[in-house]
Image: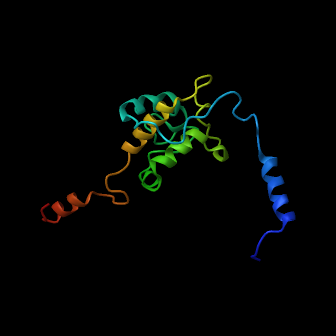
Amino acid sequence: AGGMLTEKQIDALVTGIRSWAKPNALGDQTPPPYRAAAPGDPERGADAYRTYCSSCHGASGRGGSKASSIVNGSYLALVSDQQLRTIVIAGRPELGAPDWRGDVEGRPMSAQDISDVVAWLSSQRSRFPGEPYPMSSMNTARGGSQ
């Protein structure tokens, strides 16, 4: 109920956290950097998406046999490019989604592939998130000008 942790409580927490560790989880591979070295290219991202992601998320990203939509406007409005990059690198193990190594057997995504897929996903964001119609078309329909 508040206050500082005792040494015994700290030891219990540290022991628990260490028990979750998987020291050989990455094998001999080094994960891509979480910070993009260069901006991605949406056109190359579309190709990388088809190669690495479409088998689960479908050809257009709207969902497939194994995973849901990743181009849903509400979802993309809520996540940053950095969050998207983190998800591509780490995967979503709680949902059975692979990390950067598990999409194509023996062919992990490069840091540039990840940046490109993130750029493609970002390009799928709605210009007017949360709005079913762009504000300019609503004003035009009402006789307003813009």
In the displayed structure, 4 sits above or below 111; it is below
Which part of the image, by quadrant, shows the N terminus?
Answer: bottom right
The image shows residue 44 at horizontal and vertical percentages of: 39, 29
Query: What residue is rendered at 38% in x and 48% in y?
Result: 125
Q: Residue furthest right?
A: 8
Which part of the image, by quadrant, shows the C terminus?
Answer: bottom left
The image shows residue 55 at horizontal and vertical percentages of: 53, 31
Relative depth, front residue between 94 and 28: 28
Q: Is residue 143 left or right of residue 114?
A: left
Relative depth, front residue between 115 and 75: 115
Q: Is residue 130 left or right of residue 80?
A: left
Task: Say how the picture is coloured.
Answer: rainbow
Query: What residue is rendered at 78% in x and 47% in y?
Result: 20
Give the total of numbered labels. 0
The image shows residue 51 at horizontal and vertical percentages of: 49, 27
Q: Quadrant of residue 2?
A: bottom right
In the displayed structure, 72 sits above or below 116; it is below
Query: What residue is rendered at 44% in x and 45% in y?
Result: 71
Relative depth, front residue between 35 and 78: 35
Q: Is residue 132 left or right of residue 106?
A: left
Q: Residue furthest top?
A: 106
